Amino acid sequence: MYRDTPKPTRLEDYQPPEFLIDRAELRFDLDAVETLVSAALEIRRNPAAKRGDGSLRLDGEQLELLEIALDDRALPPVEYVVDERTLVVQRVPDRFQLRTRVRIHPAANTALEGLYISGDMLCTQCEAEGFRRMTYFLDRPDVMARFAVTLVADATRYPVLLSNGNPIDQETLPGGRHLARWEDPFPKPSYLFALVAGDLARIEDSFTTASGREVALHLYMEPRNRDKCGHAMRSLKAAMRWDEEHYGREYDLDLFMIVAVSHFNMGAMENKGLNVFNAKYVLASPETATDQDFAGIASVVAHEYFHNWTGNRITCRDWFQLSLKEGFTVFRDQEFSADQGGRDVQRIADVRALRARQFPEDAGPMAHPVRPSSYIEINNFYTTTVYEKGAELVRMQARLLGPERFRAATDLYFQRHDGQAVTTEDFVRCMEDASGLDLTQFRRWYEQAGTPVLECTADWEAGQGTYRLEVRQHTDPTPGQPEKSPRHMPLALGLIGTDGRELPVQLAGEPAPIGPGTRVLELREARQVFEFVGLSERPVPSLLRGFSAPVKLRFPYSDEELTRLMAADPDGVARWNAAQQLAERVLLAMVVTPDTPPPQAFIDAFAAALGDQEADPALLAEVLALPSESYLGDQMQAVDVDGIHRAREALMVQVATALRADLLERYHALHRFEPVTDQAAASTDREPDLSPAAMGRRALKNLCLGYLMRAPDDAVLALCQRQYATAATMTDRIAGLRGLIRLRDTDQAELAEQALTDFYQRWSQDALVLDKWFAIQAQASAPGTLGRVKQLLRHANFSIGNPNRVRSLIGAFAAGNPVCFHAADGGGYRLLAEQVARLDPLNPQLASRLLHPLTQWRRHDASRQALMRAELEGLRARDGISPDLFEVLGKCLD
Ligand code: 0A1
Ligand code: ZN
């Protein structure tokens, strides 16, 4: 924590490093309370950099310097200066060895950056700037060194000692200690360094690469979790094969390790050869993990593995380029998941997430370009804009190039930049060089923040069979960017006829005939008109198929046209989007006029989709899910939190009442596939099916249950209780619990309490399942939730030191329960501000992330604005807040 005002770092000030580090030999004498770190660094002046004042500045924080020597000469204090953030060694030669020895305190490290303890193990997190908390170094990604690491620790407490690369040596030492040596042959930036020490179990497998090399795969976990790692291992092997097949990328070391840790700020980390994972993204069994958890594991395992090429072999020049590795890697993991589980459903989930999180970020005080130009605390920029919007930018380039040219472009990227630290500009240049396309205008996507809006209108000239589509684009101002220029983007579309069939998409003046199907048009201008010819009837346009660009598209569809698209659009994403628009329209009307019944056409369209036996159940589950409360809020000038909640609940009750029989029928037809547990014997008659098809069936079944539980009669209640009690999967059990918890604060409350008690008793020993128990209560919309969250903060199983637990209670409440968080008396805001204040001195990165729901204060009514603002001001007035919080508060208050 620093007392001075934190200063921004700016992209325009980037300078190549004055010195390079070729080799780093590190020795860690490990101990939870006090660890000694010795470093021997081979340093030389960078011939490509401007000469400075001749001194060397190394980064270092919270280090106690014990020894320092240059080329074996101990340095007297007059030759160096140490402050809170740097070690400056004056007048160094052009090439030299620097040795330092420092003391650090892992057990006191609550920020979980650098070396820290998680349970009984020691582990590290270095991205973005954690390495400097372990030793003095040039802690920036464009300095790439070869690392050799010696780990020394107590042999009983820490029998397993891991670091990056290959194991070289092991020795037993006197005094019950032992030693392990690791060497990583690939030069890497310090943020990819890792070590782990602990009493860990291991599961092993192997993978033969396309060129026939054998890679050992080791997965480490706390011994009690060893039977929950099969899915992660299978996902890893699938990801390795997929990267070979789709990008020609092979793994490059003989050993790949993943370690599951229970205390972790983010999802996982791609350290070279030694990925460290939040246990949530490794451990799963059907009884403890939901289908969504299984999908999350596959995607995060793949994501981290893919980083080996997009991030590690080719890394970022500086942190402004973060999306170079993150955007591309998210795109890669999304495509992997689409191939594994179903393309439309994956794309819909990605679009939902983008709209729910990235669009609001891009329209609020934290809006920033995919390549930001300034930051105070880089940890604040691991955002959905850098990750998910960054992935959309890669996806659009892939669309514009087409599959063959995109593959040629990525091949060129890997070949041209292997071993380098590069920029998003280098990436785009490869896209251009391999394709011949001019992406000059496309580059604006990296520089301009904000979500473009496409306003589309159309007219039909029946006599000529001509359909004219006009598209105007504009982007609202964002902080620091008042003016925006039009962007280059692919607009994928089709035209649908009355009978639901696709019509030709022939543009005026085109010589060759173009048949029906999806066509990709390119937008570049603020206004463009496309004239489709040769049509026998007025079409309904199916726009933005596959969500071909991250924009808000408006078109004045009639309800009847949306219903047609919802029933017939062959593009699953467009079909889903039509359903969402229809529901949104109905819901927003209900917000304005609370007692309006939904149009019969909406109920009919819903019934038709529910009864569609041809469509993929997973897709139907998406089509029939109403837009979320936060998405609906985002569509309003001033968010009417209560009105939205009331309307959404009312519509669900109306659907449940009108379609009770249809919902029950579909529920039972789908539930028949599930094995059930015999409660007494606690065993299942069959193994649960974890195929994508089975997951899709469960999703649709539990959607039906969710509706039915909005208007529960005795039969429905009994069914929900039975599902809860006899479920063979966590997916079904949690869906049952979610249904029952609605009864809280009603006269059947004891059914909810019984189920919650039962759940707690079954799972109180399993931290990841207990997280669900906390989260499900924090998200309940029952009026007593705020009071319960306060009680849960005092629960014996709550721990402010465990980020997963903090997210599952405080995060789930603030970000996942709009109606209770925004209670009119400001109680929800107060709770969040208090917890952020409590967390900030311990773990500023987490505190700053949790604060986000309050940063959207300008979107609410005057009274809530005042309450939210007061909490933000209160936080800003506190002494010694972290740079993380300082930056976020500054952006949203000034
Ligand atoms: N690079 C990781 C994410 C990550 C970022 C920062 C962390 O700590 C500050 C930890 C992980 C990824 O994209 O998976
Ligand atoms: Zn990543």
Image: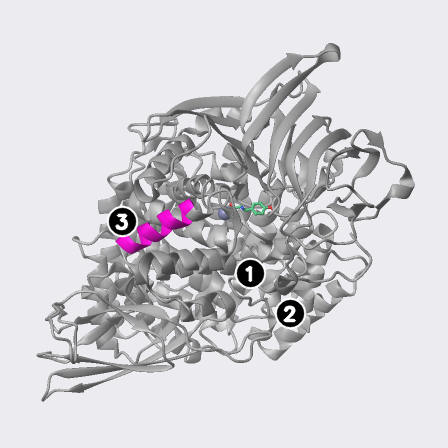
Looking at the picture, the colour scheme in use is: one colour
Is label 3 in a helix, a strand or a loop?
helix
Cα gap from disc 3 to disc 1, whole angstroms: 29 Å
Is label 1 in a helix, a strand or a loop?
loop
Q: Amino acid at mark 1?
A: Pro
Q: Which residue is mark 1?
A: 783
Start-end of magenta stretch: 404-415
Task: Tell me where residue 489 appears, x and y as whole percent.
Answer: 36, 69
Which of 578/32 is in front?
Answer: 32
- Would you say residue 405 sits in the magenta stretch? yes
Q: Main secondary structure of the magenta part?
A: helix
Q: Amino acid at mark 2?
A: Cys
Cα gap from disc 3 to disc 2, whole angstroms: 46 Å
Which residue is at a point 41% across and 39% down the rendered structure image? 730
Task: Tell me where residue 241 appears, x and y as whole percent.
Answer: 33, 35
Q: Amino acid at mark 3?
A: Tyr
- Is the residue at mark 2 in contact range of ligand 1, meaning its CB lies under 8 Å from it? no
Which residue is at a point 75% across and 65% down the rendered structure image? 876
Question: Residue 892 shows which numbered tag?
Answer: 2
Which residue is at a point 58% across and 68% down the rendered structure image? 856
Question: Residue 667 shows which numbered tag?
Answer: 3
